[in-house]
Structures are given as C-alpha cells and as structure tokens.
Amino acid sequence: MSMGGRLATVLGLFLVAVGLVVWGVATLLTPGVPGGVVNFTNTQAAGQPVNLTVQTVGAIGFGSHPTWVSYLVKDPRTGQWIHDTSWKLPANTVINMTVLQFDSGSPLRNQEWGQVQGTVNGAATLNGKSFSVYNSNTGNGVGHTFAIPQLNVSVPLVGVNSNANVCGAGPCQLSSPHNVETFSFKTPGPGTYNWQCFVPCALGYLFGNGGAMSTQNYMGGELEVVG
C-alpha cells in the first residue's frame, strides 16, 4: 500500500473513532423518549435496595410540550436520562431515591405538603441535611412534591433561587443550580401504584392543575411493582 493509502486508512479510522466518541457523549446527554417502563428489577441482587435517581426541570425543552415542567429518570443500565415516568420495581424492597431538583419554588397553598411522610425513617435529606418539615414560606419555597398516595409517601422538593435557575431545558447538568434530596421508601406487594406532584405548577392552566400536572411522563407516573 502506498504512503497516501496508509494515511487515508489511518485518517479514516481516526474519524470513525471520533464519531463513536461523539455518538456516545450525545447518547448520554440527550434524553430518551417515553417508550415503555424503565426496569429497576434486575439492577441489584435479590433483596437488596434499589437506587433510583430522577431530576425535575422547569422546562423539558423538546417534544410536543417543550415548555412544560417534567420529571426525568436515569436509566439504571446506561445512565441516560429518560423522559418516562413509568418504573418497574421489585416488591417488598427499599427504594433509595435521589432527586436532583433544578426548578424554582414558591410558598405552598397547603402547608401539609411541606411535611415528609411515608419514608423509611420519616425524614429526607436536603443537600445532606436531614429534615422532616420544610417551611415553604422561607428560602426559595417548594417547587414540587414526589408523592405516592396509596403508600402515604410524600416528600417536598425544595426550589432553587429563581434568579439563578439557568437550566433552560432538560436534562439539566450538575453545573446548573440545583438541590439534592434523598429519601427511601419500601414497596408493598405486587400492583400498580400512581405517583404524582401535588404542587400546582402548570402555568397557564386553571389553578395550575392542568397541562403537565395531569399528563403522564411529566409530573406524574406509575410504579409497576412486581414479585
């Protein structure tokens, strides 16, 4: 093979390698779209806790409703952020939740939603500090809640400073202002359990309860608990 041919081959292989790297990075940074149930039943040894990470964003940034607030979940296999709020979980198992909260907040209309309920120890952590009640009339208020009514689980998700909320679209990166909340709850026996946000956050809709608040894959979803 001539020198020119060898150089062309090397250059071609280099471009292929660069393309694969770019594709891999783009896959991790680009959210997947709803396509079924995100499976958490085979990510750990039987009987061991499941780690589940989500983020809340002020605007999803794509799809038919790009300005709607939304949850995204981290795929346990690939680490990719998925725009899907239906999750398959093992029964009778502790679920360790991590919530990356990128959205701003406001005072609650009902202060009951500022209480932590139904978690393993009756508390949650906010940026590493334990709390059982959050006064939404202080600080940056509450942006959302993660609540599973059938399991009496409810956790307020504290908002970030609205003036610093620079994440324009999901998925947000850790470089953007956010709060980290953690808590654990235990799944019951097999069944389907709805979860949702109870803080009205659908701007432009009557009482803030339409739009994203009442649409699957935005501010609510399902837990498919299996044996």
Image: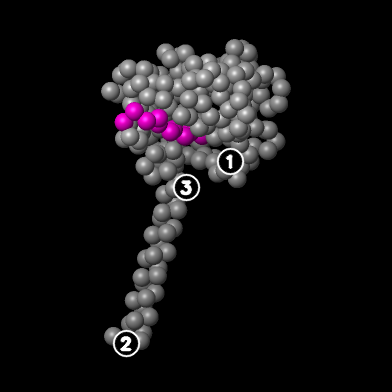
Of the pair 20 and 79, the residue shown nearer to us: 79
Closer to viewer: mark 3 or mark 1: 3
Query: Could you say which disc has been placed on residue 2 in the image?
Result: 2
The boundaries of the magenta stretch are 46-56
Tag 3: Cα neighbours inside 10 Å, few (<14), some, or many (≥20)?
some
From the image, state whether disc 2 or disc 1 is nearer to you. 2
Crowd rating for badge 2 (residues with CA inside 10 Å; few <14, some 14–19, many 20+): few
Dot 1 alpha-carbon crowd within 10 angstroms: few under 14, some 14 to 19, many 20 or more: some
The amino acid at mark 2 is Ser
The numbered disc on residue 168 is 1
Measuring from the top left, give residue 125's x and y in whole percent.
58, 27
Q: Earlier in the sequence, mark 2 or mark 3?
A: 2
Task: Give 156 or 133, whichever is nearer the viewer.
Answer: 133
Among numbered discs 3 and 1, the one appearing first in the sequence: 3
- Report x, y in % for residue 65: 48, 33
In the picture shown, does residue 130 fall above or below 1?
Answer: above
Q: How is the image coloured?
A: one colour
